[in-house]
């Protein structure tokens, strides 16, 4: 009798949770630039994450959506935040932006000043938090794969990554430290100190291996408690 | 009797309007960068406009407010639009931004791409129009005063000015073509083809004469029907 | 008798000149960047000049040689001056450099400061003059064909062109004012204010028409007394 | 008798050498940019080296000369090589250039491409070697003193330093690895990860401590066998 009661008690609590889970998967938006735009292609990292979830029989628990546009910098995300993210009512958002903020300084003269980068980044966070979104911030990966700190933008990417780590701490947010993961990987797996060809095809955009590696790291962050 | 009635009818309609006018001056915000930030200083162009209104006995009809921050580009205006403009319920807004969008390309590598410039500019306009604000758009003045089209940023400033003229047409807005006014003035008043010293102290920021010239042009635009 | 004497006198003077002319054509080197490198291709401007000379039966009087290397700036010319020009003992040298000195500022951050541009340019001239070479200096053509002074580098190209005009005057050299010729042509022949497609394929490198136009202007300068 | 002869033979050879040594100190030229220009000031590194030699009673053995000009890049050194170095018949030359080649990319858009940097560097070396000069090549120190590889130009400075190390190897030259020395020092002596104030006043130019540190490292290289 007591056991039955206990079972019922558990059932009363657990069943609605289960039901909710089945009816409404966790909606996850990846908000970023060209790497994320390519993330929903057949070999992209978001596609690979969906495949990983299927393989684990968890496809009904998550709904992964890409919101990446090539060439985007942090303020471009801010301009389309309402349309491309908030209006879609996501539960989780990965912010993965910064490559172009650094890169375009050299290639077009139109990068983003570090103080402005932080300002817009925190403006994004504020609006997402107001909608109770779980925000996961990512450090920018690489512009060049050399592992002796001699890629031209390494200093700046390290600096912007540090700014994001500080943003995570200050706003009490989960950090997905992609730059660190990439650097650690390349320290082990780039014996010839190549500029590209390991995780990237062109120093920035991902190889199949790069997409796979990114998918794993994003997944770890997503399922983390 | 009928005449009296008519007079009264007119009086009932007109008196509140007259009263309103006296009670509530036209609120005008100047939204821009360091030139506008300096505009509210004792010798700045906004101060000079207020003095012009006083001299004409119109000080009660207009309330001029500066909203300029040094180093601002178009997307910085977008970020602070709500706080610094919309929340103040202005009747008229001058948008005067673009110098840094061009200049910072060279000095910091952090200028603004032309397509992004237009995008953010029109996003500003859209939000202001939704609040029934009369928007006056200004072309960027100068970076260097040489009058033979040989200042390094002349090509880019001409291009961004053209974009603003197109924005004005497309959005049916009043244009205050400051760049044209400055170029015409310098064609006449810079016989030695100097880089600075006529309207600017340092190729960008205004001399007393520059502030006076700007104040006149802004005033013409403001009182224009 | 007197007539015979006169004839002989003329013959004594003229014959050696004629002989010299036939034995040794005037050697002309075009010293520059990618436009000049492409100048010796089948449709290039130097090839077209050679064809023009043939059509006029003057092919034996001139020997045209290209010395252009893609991406070259003025200091690159200085580094290879001995090998690619002086050692070849030319009679005439066209210096046609400046596009990359301006353009690379934006695209790679590796343009040339104006004062350094002048310094290296005059160092080139000094060494050529020491070898009695007739030097013809050319202003840089275009980066973008818009005819309303709104190509991003127009201001800088106008400035560097002015520097070259001043170099020509200061060093008493012949000027081939290519930028002016191009601007005048585009003012007449670019009704839609296009960025490219009239004289250039890509805002810089020449169409067949562009090569033809350049060949004519270079030829005028070459045969000028 | 044979011994006397041998002694005399040695004496005849050795005495002039000894005499020459005493009469003619080793002439050392420091060839570089603003850091070297400031090196001959009362607190500069070259002045400190001269003081060190005096303290050791070796002032008659060395003659140290500065040949630094503010803002110089590698090609500027090439332009003034004859006048400022070769014509002075030095025995030893320190080449210490590269900061501006990297820095000016961002601040003026007029840095030096890496391949051109190597080309001009080796052209310098070739001409010095032809005059039997002992060349010591130095890696560029720092632009920013942060010790977590997050100064904006760290990647590029590391890259150009690697190019110089390769130049040293390829040309069989002595290397004075200043960048490594500075980085090692800052790893130990910059606990707050400051941008400036330890070895530099402004991220680039040297404090008194910086000049002292540089003088020691240069001296070690100079007296090295």
Image (tube, coloured by chain):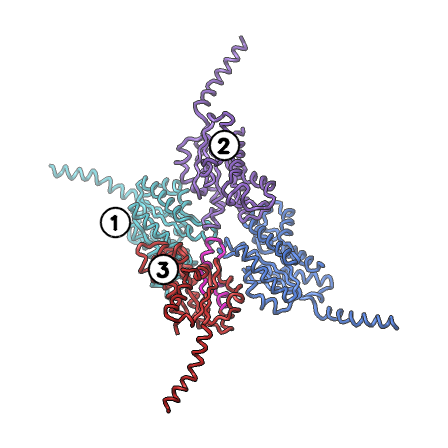
Chain colours: A red, B blue, C purple, D cyan
**Number of the label disc, if any, that sits on residue D225:** 1
Residue numbers of the magenta segment: A95-124
Please tell me how crowded label 1 is: few (under 14), some (14-19), or many (20+) other residues with Cα within 10 Å.
few
State how far apart marks 3 and 1 are (Cα).
50 Å
Q: Quadrant of the C terminus of chain C?
A: top right
Instruction: Mark 1 vs mark 2: give the one in front.
Output: 2
Residue bearing mark 3: A209
State how far apart marks 2 and 3 are (Cα).
54 Å
On whether residue C157 falls in the magenta region, the answer is: no
Residue B166 found in image quarter? bottom right
State how far apart marks 1 and 2 are (Cα).
60 Å
- Secondary structure found at label 2: helix
Asked whether disc 3 touches disc 1, contact meaning CB atoms under 8 Å apart, the reply is no
> Taking A4 as reference, is A187 above or below it?
above
Q: Nearer the viewer, residue D141 or A48?
A: A48
> Taking D76 as reference, is A48 above or below it?
below
Residue B214 in the image: state x and y as whole percent.
64, 56
């Amino acid at each position: 009798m007591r056991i039955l009661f206990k079972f019922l008690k558990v059932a009363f609590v657990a069943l609605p949770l289960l039901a909710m889970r089945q009816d409404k998967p966790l909606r996850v938006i990846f908000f970023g630039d060209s790497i994320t735009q390519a993330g929903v292609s057949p070999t992209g990292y978001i596609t690979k994450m969906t495949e990983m979830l299927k393989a684990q029989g968890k496809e009904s628990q998550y709904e992964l959506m890409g919101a990446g546009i090539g060439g985007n910098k942090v303020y471009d995300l801010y301009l389309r935040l309402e349309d491309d993210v908030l209006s879609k009512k996501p539960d989780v958002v990965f912010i993965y932006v910064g490559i172009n903020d650094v890169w375009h300084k050299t290639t077009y003269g139109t990068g983003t000043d570090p103080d402005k980068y932080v300002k817009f980044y925190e403006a994004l966070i504020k609006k997402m938090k107001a909608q109770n979104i779980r925000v996961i911030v990512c450090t920018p990966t690489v512009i060049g794969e050399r592992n002796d700190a001699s890629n031209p933008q390494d200093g700046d990417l390290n600096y912007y990554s540090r700014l994001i780590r500080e943003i995570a701490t200050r706003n009490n947010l989960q950090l997905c430290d992609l730059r660190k993961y990439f650097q650690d990987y390349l320290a082990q797996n780039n014996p010839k100190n190549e500029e590209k060809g390991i995780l990237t095809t062109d120093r920035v955009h991902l190889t199949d291996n790069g997409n796979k590696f990114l998918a794993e790291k994003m997944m770890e962050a997503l399922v983390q408690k």
